[in-house]
Amino acid sequence: MEQFMLDNAERYKRLVAAFKPSASDSKGASSSVASSEIVVSTRVRPMLEDEVSQGFPPCVYLRGSSNTVDVHELRRPVRGLPTINSFNYTVDQVFGPESTTAEIYESLVKPLVPWAWGGGVGTMFAYGQTGSGKTFTVSGLEKHVAETLMDGSLEGERKVYMSIIELAGQTAYDLLNARKQISILEDSFGTTQMAGAIEHHVTDKASLLEFIEAAASLRKTAPTFKNDTSSRSHAICRLRFENPLIPSAEDGVLYLVDLAGSEAARDKADHDVTRMKEAREINTSLSVLKDCIRGRALADADSFAGKISKKPAYIPFRQSTLTKTLKHVFDPAGARSCKTVVVACVNPCLADVGASKNTLRYAEMLRVLVPRNKAAECSPDVPATWNNEQLRDWIQSNSGNPPVTPSLLAPTETGEQLLRLPVPEFLSRCLKTPGVSPEQAQAFQSKFWKMHIDSQRSIAGSASKPTAPLNSTDKTNAIEAARSRPELLDSSADPDPDAVSISFKQRIRPGMVVSWKPPAEYASFSVGGKSYAIVLSPVQAVGEKVRDALGRQVNKAGKGAEEEKEEGEAYLCAIVLPALLPGSYGISLWRQVVVRVEEMEAEVLLEWDEATRYYYMTV
């Protein structure tokens, strides 16, 4: 076949030059748009010197300034002169042979770095035929990521941890620990753990690059027809960002994944049984990866469009070690904010036209088109429908005291965009407002997200009805007024609306939750530097036999008036401790302590959630 291509190379060039695409070739209806959570791109590498010297022409052509790629295949007819079969593929972004890795980084991967730095999950996949420049692209992108992380341009302070693993079939290895075998397991909470992998703390660009080079030298390779050092495994570089200012928030994660190279039919001609099995495992994992990426993108689009199906989309992330390792990138039940970039590397040589078609077909299938949403009529109960002005009004009226500065939290975002913001980034923006505490920021984020979940349930349970334009203050007051007193008691907030204007120390009551500064004897009840307690009763109201968590008598009989005055007013309280779920709290009713009024710092509002059976902070 290759000799046929060489013999008819000149005719092929003339046919390609005469090719004119028709308007019907462009794919993707105007009623659909690409998913904002996944960007699919292709990079066409330059022709190599040996390919040019042999006389092979290129078969992949970029169509002007559009995102469409044309592939022309030389067809051998039964009789007559050869003709060409033309195919076109559309992706989100196209990079030609003249594009540099720096340009690809600035356009695609660089936005993932602050996203993960802020607490989200960013993932970059590089896919393509062996010899298409895939590993070259990934190694260059990793160096640019190292530069961005360590040049001081990112806001805030983070601890950066790094691990690099290799997946060969169903087996995993730690490339930063002499390629020792590790296990990919799920813990009791359903979170995938890389058991046995060592995570390294990196503080400078040089050490980060050293780890990358060390991992590359240990990666499994094998010679193929196209590449003497073809990567025969998936390499996953994982960077984790820990925010010391918000220890309770989930860490941001950035994955840089160099997928195993696919092979053309001629590459497999001399394979033995082991290599054929290896090729099947690679193809299976890539097929599952495609289904997972598409499934997660469609699930996200349906969620924010208000489409909640009784039967959620099936995402088969457990069918491959690769996708099981990246479970929280694909799992629709997870609440992590994820963005994904795919770079499909293409070999432009006519001799590899079959592999190039497969690569571009795979990339095009990853591109998820969702219906173009009509401008939704704003609803006061549906945050996803708010524009920036309406969102700012709601933030000003509902973020507690002091109110979060709307321009700091949502400078340009709409309601839907703010919902997609990673939780740590949301909290960091809230804390820029003077006087806002971490507890208030966490409580406000929980309130905003709960409102979104409730709105989606409401949309799924009943037909949508036109609503009046948003007036946040009036609507909030109307909603609160419509709630019955038993409903108001699902929160520790005082049901009296006038209580807000009175200092909390002047209206202490049973059921009030406070943050307090414990004395030395109660220091063991402080978790993460914060202590919370729920008021049960005044100390004077309990019997003489009541004792606190340390076994000390609470109400000492026979104390004189002067002694009571010196000790100050005190209350018997129960300890409030963090629960299993992130941001949740439980009341340890039998762990009772004596809290004096002067030790109380602020009132904290907790709200009961029936679904999880935990309490959550609110404002």
Image (cartoon, rainbow, N blue to C red):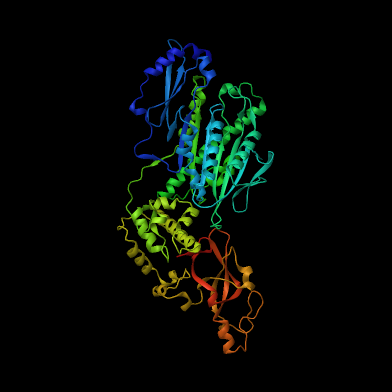
Residue 277 drawn above or below residue 540: above
The answer to which quarter of the image holds residue 88 is top left
The answer to whether residue 320 is visible is: no
Residue 405: x %, y % from top left? 40, 59
Near-viewer residue (389 or 23): 389
The quadrant where residue 175 appears: top right
Give x and y (percent) for residue 141.
53, 37
Residue 552 image offset from top left, x and y in percent? 65, 79
Task: Decide: is 532 above or below 300.
Answer: below
Q: Residue at x 43, y 15 (%)?
A: 12
The percent position of residue 549, horizontal first and vertical second, equals 64, 74
Task: State how many labels appear.
Answer: 0
Decide if residue 319 is on the left or right side of residue 88.
right
Which residue is pictured at 32% across the width and 58% down the height? 470
Nearest the eye: 459 or 439: 439
Q: Nearer the viewer, residue 369 or 121?
A: 121
Q: Which is more toward the observer, 367 or 119?
A: 119
Residue at the image point whose x is 56% and y is 56% from the top: 244
Is 502 placed left or right of 131 in the picture? left
Q: Locate the C terminus and report the quarter of the image it occupies.
A: bottom left
Q: Is residue 179 visible?
A: yes
